[in-house]
Image (cartoon, helix red, strand yellow):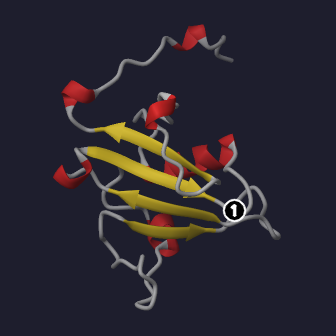
Amino acid sequence: MRMPFPATVEHARIREPSDIYATKTGDLFGAFLFRNPFQPDNGDALRVVANNASRDSFWWEHVSVSTATRCPTWPEMCFIKDLFWHEDECVVQYHPALKDYVNHHPYTLHLWRPTKQSDRRPTQPSMLVGPKR
């Protein structure tokens, strides 16, 4: 995960003391509200909650992304991924076993990255997805 967060992320940070999700500039976690770059006129804002990897999070970096009316799109998830992680970092969206489903908000998707080497998952060869252009 990018540390410190880029200026674009800090600009979107929720800081209002009356908001229960408010955090301070430089905190390695927080809630953020981004204007949607794919719907700049009146599109759904991208609401993001991020944590840093710590013992409390079992050493997993995590970002949740939501809108008020629908699930985020692939381009929106890529936009957020690129804000919070470097381009050479692999993060994943999991589809867990049904018994492990948790759904606190119907329009939220999650990005995950384990930070302990023993937890790293292999990725498929890109040629199995399709040819590169």
Q: Given the current orientation, which residue lies at the most extreme right position? A: 41
**Residue 92, how many percent across, how many down?**
47, 34
Drawn side of residue 49 relative to residue 57, left or right: right
Q: Which residue is mark 1?
A: 36
Above or below residue 52? Residue 121 is: above
Quadrant where the C terminus lies?
A: top right
**Residue 111, how many percent across, how many down?**
47, 43
Which amino acid type is shown beneath numbered disc 1? Asn
**Residue 26, how many percent across, how many down?**
31, 71
Q: Residue at x 60, y 58 (%)?
A: 66
Label 1 residue SS = loop
Q: Given the current orientation, which residue lies at the most extreme left position? A: 55
Above or below residue 85? Residue 11 is: below
Q: Residue at x 34, y 64 (%)?
A: 29
Above or below residue 8? Residue 111 is: above
Q: Residues within 10 Å of mark 1 (few under 14, many from 20)?
A: some
Above or below residue 29? Residue 54 is: above
Q: Which of 89/68 is in front?
A: 68
The image quadrant that residue 112 belongs to is top left
